[in-house]
Amino acid sequence: MAEHQQLARLQVASGGYLAQLTNLGVPYLARAGVLVVMFVVAMMIMHDLGFTPDHSQRPLAEMKLIIRSSVDNGLKVPAIRATMMAGVFSGGVGMMAVEVVGGQGSRWG
């Protein structure tokens, strides 16, 4: 068995055990606490070397520039526009499928 699968089984078992000792919300709170600790550790350890913020323009002007370049390099290019629209429609079909399957009495609803 792969190491990743063993770790996943350990996490599931420990979450179940913790929920059995307390209540069902405690494993979620424990996971949130671990994520907060990992975020703090990452903030202290990881450094962005070589990054200097550009303060030459005002924030709104910079946002307009980013939006304009996104439209120019995204929506105005036919291949990228088709890919973006395909993502929107496939996500919509997925949501519709969940609604159809999630009717009353089903295991999703």
Image: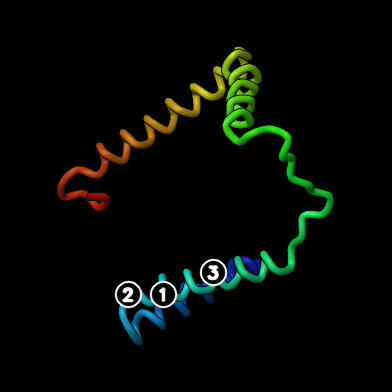
Label pair 1/3, CB-CB below 8 angstroms? no
* Amino acid of disc 3: Val
User: N-terminal of the two: label 1 or label 3?
Assistant: 1
* Vertical comparison of 96 with 79: above or below: below
Q: Which mark is residue 27?
A: 1
Q: Is residue 88 left or right of residue 21?
A: right
Whether residues under marks 2 and 1 lie with C-beta atoms below 8 angstroms apart, the answer is yes
Q: Residue 7 vs residue 33: left or right?
A: right
Residue 32 place in picture, x, y as percent: 47, 69
Residue at image location 63% in from the left, 34% down from the top = 58
Q: Tell me the quarter of the picture where residue 59 sits.
A: top right
Checking the image for residue 24, the label placed there is 2
Query: Which mark's residue is nearer the viewer, 3 or 2?
Result: 3
Q: Quadrant of residue 23?
A: bottom left
Q: Residue 36, labelled with which disc?
A: 3
Amino acid of disc 2: Leu
Cα separation between marks 2 and 1: 7 Å
Which quadrant would the N terminus be assigned to in this image?
bottom right
Q: x, y (%) of residue 19? A: 36, 79
Q: Are marks 3 and 2 in contact (CB under 8 Å)?
A: no
Which residue is painted at 76% across and 60% down in the image? 47
* Residue, far left: 104
10 horizontally vs 29: left or right: right
